[in-house]
Image (spheres, rainbow, N blue to C red):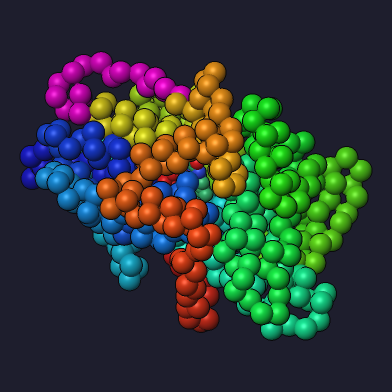
Amino acid sequence: MAHARPRVVIIGAGFAGIHCARRLKKAQVDVTLIDRSTSHVFQPLLYQCATGLLSEGAISSPIRHLTRRHRNLDVVLGEAADIDVDAREVVVDRLDLSRFRAPYDYLVVGAGMRTAYRGNDRFARFAPGMKTLDDAHVIRRKIMTAFEMAETIDDPEEQSAWLTFAVAGGGPTGVELAGQIRELATRALEREYDSIDPSRARVLLLHGGDRVLPSFDEHLSSSAQKALDKLGVETVLGVHVTGVGDDFVETTRKSDKHKEIYPARTTLWTTGVEAVPFAATLARALGVEQDRSGRIPVTDDMSVPGHPEVFVCGDMMAYDNLPGVAEVAMQSGHHAGRVIADEVAGKANRAPFKYRDLGTAAYIARRHAVVQSGRLHMRGLPGWLAWGVIHIAFLAGARNRMGTVMNWSATLLTGSRRERAIIYGDTETARTPYGHWER
Ligand SMILES: Cc1cc2nc3c(=O)[nH]c(=O)nc-3n(C[C@H](O)[C@H](O)[C@H](O)COP(=O)(O)OP(=O)(O)OC[C@H]3O[C@@H](n4cnc5c(N)ncnc54)[C@H](O)[C@@H]3O)c2cc1C
């Protein structure tokens, strides 16, 4: 029996998926929103969760709560595992690995990216990336454990390795993480330990390019560099990380191949992303080629060439060299929703996607952030205030916004960080590079 209204399946409740669902709220369609997690995560603040400033609750919102007023939408916890293009069905794994099929008339995929180690998958065991709440918790555990270990160790060399934190990648995530570890060490932990001085913590920012924040204008990146220097972050430019182990990180200088080994018990990976595994399954099924990062090509209405009923949005789409940022995800998800809603309402022509670049921002340190929006460039205190307003505006839910402002204010006034609890978990099911879903 034919379904009364067109069925839309959305895979992923990130920025793209949620904004698509919002656009379809009043459309004459039935929507199924599938995510492998119960919460929509605000990734831009993951590093603050990893460094004890914000809780996981403050930077995430339950998907069911976010969509509670959508009368045409069902939420499903599960992982899209396969797709049957002829039958128009997505094969979904439940938590217990039993499977079911979700039929669609329109499919919207916004499943995002994951950390990429580009041929160095062995690094993943030692150097976690930061894409999910699990990642933020693993990083928080590594950082907090390092200070605790250093406190109980007498050997100065070993102690110094525990107090050395290496961050691979000088893009916004690497810069923010490195800065926050120094701030954690110098402000929050400074007076809490007996035998170590946390402010001695060495933070290395290892970057392949010739300046940090390469996606920003040169004078903003040089202002960020000055703030990092003042904070005590040691930036090493022009190097690739070529080895990571339990207690060391190795770099190779690009110019002369000189190798350097730093004794470091904590290495964190922020350089490089690739599409999540479902992208390969989707590309195969649709007969399209992924780009170097595994992204799926789309046409100007966000649909996959030759498959007008399948849309790919956000980080996972390859379109017009657009970057993997939240604003692209929100606008492309919204656009896919609009195309579907228009078509269902009988409008013949599909509108092309027009991206409005609202700019980009990165936090460096207390009272210092850089913001770039067209010709408007901000840094220092004005940049920091603008950064705060932008992030609060985009956080989902009034409660998260209020909680975050309160937490930031308390940290600003007292320096303390309260979200430092770590979870040890079960060693039998120890975390794999790609989280607990990997089999
Ligand atoms: C640490 C960090 C900092 C960032 N900072 C900024 C910033 O300051 N400004 C900015 O603009 N952008 C920033 N970004 C980028 C921004 O967060 C992304 O561009 C945006 O989240 C992409 O949205 P998306 O919906 O495409 O994917 P995501 O937000 O990644 O959402 C994908 C969703 O799909 C789900 N999923 C994945 N695979 C499956 C599957 N097989 N089945 C079901 N569900 C699945 C995931 O659980 C997730 O909920 C940052 C990203 C990171 C990681």
Q: Nearer the viewer, residue 433 or 49?
A: 49
The residue nearer to you, when weighing 162 against 96, is: 162
Splitting the image into 4 quarters, where does residue 153 fall? bottom right
Q: Residue at x 71, y 39 (%)?
A: 226
Q: Look at 33% across and 71% down and name the residue there.
A: 96
Viewer-proximal residue among 235 and 431: 235
Q: Is residue 244 magenta?
A: no
In the image, is residue 215 above or below residue 190? above
Residue 359 appears at what percent x and percent y?
49, 28
Residue 110 in the image: state x and y as whole percent.
Answer: 38, 42
State whether the magenta stretch is mostly helix, strand or loop: loop
Q: Which residues are magenta?
A: 341-357
Task: Reply above or below: 76 against 145.
Answer: above
With respect to residue 8, does 260 lie above or below? below
> Is residue 110 visible from the viewing direction of this image?
no
Q: Which residue ends up furthest to the front in the rendered image?
A: 413
Q: Decide if residue 121 is on the left or right side of residue 78.
A: right
* Magenta region includes residue 345: yes
The answer to which of 320 and 370 lies nearer the viewer is 370
Q: Tell me if 282 is positioned left or right of 135 in this view.
A: left
Q: Is residue 32 visible?
A: yes
Tell me what residue is drawn at x 41 percent, y 38 percent: 389
Percent x, y of residue 70: 16, 44
Examine the image and state in which quarter residue 334 appears: top left
At a point 37% along the width and 31% down the height, the residue shown is 332
